[in-house]
């Protein structure tokens, strides 16, 4: 029987300890990065009602969680790439990986510009680009995971 067929017939298996740890870190960081953006956006009307400076205070506090999560995503993302045999991956998989890396960088730059923006238009545009790119990166990651 072909090796792939033997592996396929064995059924699902648990990730080994270090692989599981790597994936848990990556998923946890993604929940903070992606989920946090949508949580803060959903809470924004309430936050605004707490005072004129409340949105900026909440944004600064969230940034203390957001950027470490982004750093963990970058580190574990490269760790994920090292954990697979990318040399033998399909050209489609490699193309999606390249697109994901680009989208992750766009998300980071857009969120950075959103945080630095001083206009309502800048906040809205960069926030939307950052959130959309973050969701696209998440979806591409699911496709890469197979």
Image (spheres, rainbow, N blue to C red):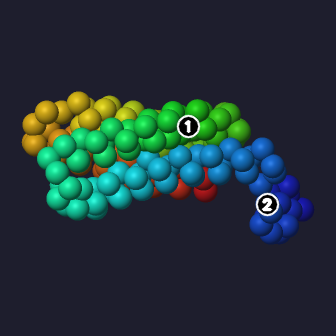
Q: Secondary structure at mark 2?
A: loop
Q: Residue at x 56, y 37 (%)?
A: 72
Q: CA distance from mark 1 to mark 2?
A: 23 Å
Screen quadrant of the C terminus: bottom right
**Residue beneath disc 2:** 14
Residue 71: x %, y % from top left: 51, 33
Q: Is residue 24 left or right of residue 50?
A: right
Q: Which residue is nearer to you in this view: 32 or 136?
A: 32
Q: Is residue 36 left or right of residue 121?
A: right
Q: Residue at x 26, y 35 (%)?
A: 115
Please state which of the two labelled residues, at mark 1 or mark 2, is closer to the viewer: 1
Q: Is residue 22 left or right of residue 64?
A: right
Q: Secondary structure at mark 1?
A: helix
Residue 47, disc: none
Q: How many marks?
A: 2
Residue 72, disc: 1
Residue 55: x %, y % from top left: 23, 47
Asked if one can make out residue 81 in the rendered structure from this viewpoint, the answer is no
Tag 2 or tag 1, which sits nearer the N-term? Answer: 2
């Amino acid at each position: 029987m072909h090796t792939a067929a033997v592996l396929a017939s064995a059924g699902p298996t648990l990730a080994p300890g270090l692989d599981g740890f790597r994936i848990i870190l990556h998923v946890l960081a993604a929940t903070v990065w992606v989920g946090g953006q949508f949580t803060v956006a959903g809470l924004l009307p309430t936050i605004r009602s707490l005072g004129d400076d409340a949105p900026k205070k909440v944004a600064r506090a969230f940034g203390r969680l957001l950027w470490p999560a982004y750093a963990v995503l970058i580190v574990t993302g490269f760790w994920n790439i090292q954990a697979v045999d990318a040399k033998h991956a399909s050209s489609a998989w490699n193309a999606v990986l390249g697109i994901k890396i680009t989208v992750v960088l766009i998300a980071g730059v857009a969120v950075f510009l959103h945080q630095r923006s001083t206009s309502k238009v800048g906040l809205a545009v960069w926030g939307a680009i950052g959130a959309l790119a973050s969701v696209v990166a998440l979806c591409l990651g699911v496709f890469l995971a197979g």
